[in-house]
Amino acid sequence: MNKKKMDKLIALSYKDKYFDKKIVNKIVSVLSRADLKKYINGLKLAEKKRSLIVSSPVIDSDLNKFRKLFPHKKIVFKKDPSLILGTQVIDNDIVYEFTLKNSIDKILNHIEQTYD
Amino acid sequence: MIDNDKIIETLEKKIMTFGRDSKTQNVGIVVKNTDGVIIASGLSRASMGEKVIFNNGNSGTIFNLDEDNVSIILLEEASGIKEGDIVRTTGEMLSIEVSEDLLGRVIDPLGNPLDSKPKIKKGKNMPLEKIAAGVVEREPVSFPLKTGIKAIDSMFPIGRGQRELIIGDRQTGKTAIAIDTIINQKFNKKPVICIYVAIGQKRSTIAQVIDRLNSEGAGNYSIVVSASASDPASLQYLAPYAGCSIAEYFLEKGKDVLIVFDDLTKHAWAYRQISLVLRRPAGREAYPGDVFYLHSRLLERSVKLNKENGGGSITALPIIETQANDISAYIPTNVISITDGQIYLQTDLFNSGIKPAINIGQSVSRVGSAAQTQTIKSVSGKLKLELAQYSSLAAFAQFGTELDNATQKQLDRGKRLTEILKQPQYSPLTENLEVLSIYAVTSGAMDDIPTDSFQEFEKEMHDFAKKRYPEVLESLSTGERPTEQILKQITKLVEEFKKRFR
């Protein structure tokens, strides 16, 4: 199956932001083993593109603002105490860092590069 | 020494800015790791040639950009990277830190020291890939770069900013010519910085070269960039570009640089290996389609800048190893067409005792004669022609036919010229001594000296001239055409020495 057709199948597998179970089951049952592999990989990539991961040391109501900012994305909240303070937002392959951990890492990096 | 106050001040500044500056990172996930080439998904904002960092601290550079993934070549051993690892872009193109501290050091293509000397201080960040200087910034080659080898300086002169290929089979003395040229730079009034780039060679061979450079006193103006046979193909591929970046740092300061690429055959092999693993379409001899561009963009960076741009130069001596003297193979023809001439070394000549084993007929220097001084030009004018005629006559003479007097004379002169152009390794000569030797033969003053004692005669004659006729040698160092009087003095010098030698 060519890429164009596979992309079409992946797009059909979604209903709004979520998988359409019925359609996915139907597609899986008719695909060959090789195409199934491609389909699963494609779904994984599509899932990544459609979701936004918000990590923070504390989950509070303020984080709900992200739902308004990204209405077309599936928002996933994650609790990560190692970030110390602030928020980290992962949008597919772009990571936005607003955390204290990142600032400390930057300072460390700066010191390493300047005073080696 | 670290200044504590400065550190505190920087830390304070950095902490004050916390919360205001965000950091955007482009990340990817390792999908496949094959022989030092990583396929990663994501990295949608990555650019070609960008440096990337893996979670375990390893680094790599982007080599292919596809629709859903990117290909990365690793710059270290590939052992620690597995499927699912995170890889981040850095926003930096691959570069090397260059400073004067590199002089006398041995480094890898990323600038890490390989010798046991102190850490190299950080300097200017020079990109590994750079577009060569344009035509407006350049000027024609006009100043000689002396190799100290009689045969080359007289017949195939090299100018500063030229690219002269050294080509030949294994064990014909290619590296020896390059090393002699580096050693000879110590005689220059204006220093020439020398960079020796070892690509895909045995570590023992590289160690020998370094040892020789140090023992001959060439270590303090030389830099060795080493990517040995046991290093990853990616490092072997990057080594000549790193050497060129270092050369460009000194070029920017208006200095003259000599760079030796030893050798570009192995560089092409490394690139072929990477390209095949990346599944790029293979062409002739399984090399990728852009193998010509690989070398042309490297050698185009050799330059002679005009005075407005500092007047510096980069002279390149690329080396190519042929198989069974086949200079018409793919890579040799490519590099021959890129360079401004070639010095062709032959196994037969080497085995018959002619060292350096230069094939006069097939060697050429296309721009160097403009840079040759009048002194050496005046004595070596007919040299190449006479020697070329000699080799064709010598082939006929082998049939044992009777020869007329003129032919016999020509053969005899050719034999003597061949003999005087022989030169032992690691003993480059200054221009005045080269002129003295060549003129002594071409003028016929050495016609009564048996050819088997030429080497000894020449060596002792040089010592004699240095002691008794320093003014003659001085006048031959000016670069001007020698006057009739000086030529007469040279003849007198030879005649006088002949009496002592016998």
Image (cartoon, rainbow, N blue to C red):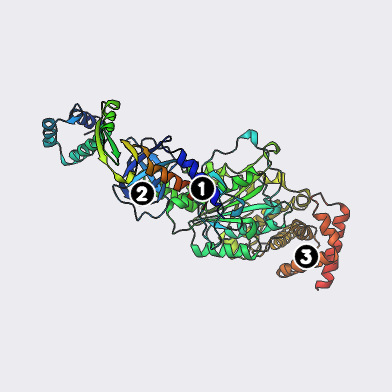
Q: Could you tell me which secondary element the residue under label 3 belongs to?
A: helix
- Density class for disc 3 (Cα within 10 Å; few <14, some 14-19, many ≥20) is many
- Density class for disc 1 (Cα within 10 Å; few <14, some 14-19, many ≥20) is few
Screen quadrant of the N terminus of chain B: bottom right
Q: Nearer the viewer, mark 2 or mark 1?
A: 1
Q: Which mark is residue B462?
A: 3
- Front residue of B97 and A36: B97
Q: Is residue B451 above or below residue A114?
A: below
Whole-percent x, y for residue B332 in the image:
52, 49
Whole-percent x, y for residue B318 in the image:
57, 50
Left or right of B386? Residue B495 is: right
- Give the CA distance from mark 3 to mark 2: 64 Å
Is residue B215 visible from the viewing direction of this image?
Answer: yes
Q: Earlier in the sequence, mark 3 or mark 2?
A: 2
Whole-percent x, y for residue B329 in the image:
49, 49
The chain ID associated with circle 3 is B
Q: Amino acid at mark 3?
A: His
Left or right of B295? Residue B422 is: right
The chain ID associated with circle 1 is B
Is residue B389 visible from the viewing direction of this image?
Answer: no
Q: Amino acid at mark 2?
A: Asn
Which residue matches tag 2?
B55
User: Both on one chain, marks 3 and 2?
Assistant: yes
Q: Which mark is residue B8?
A: 1
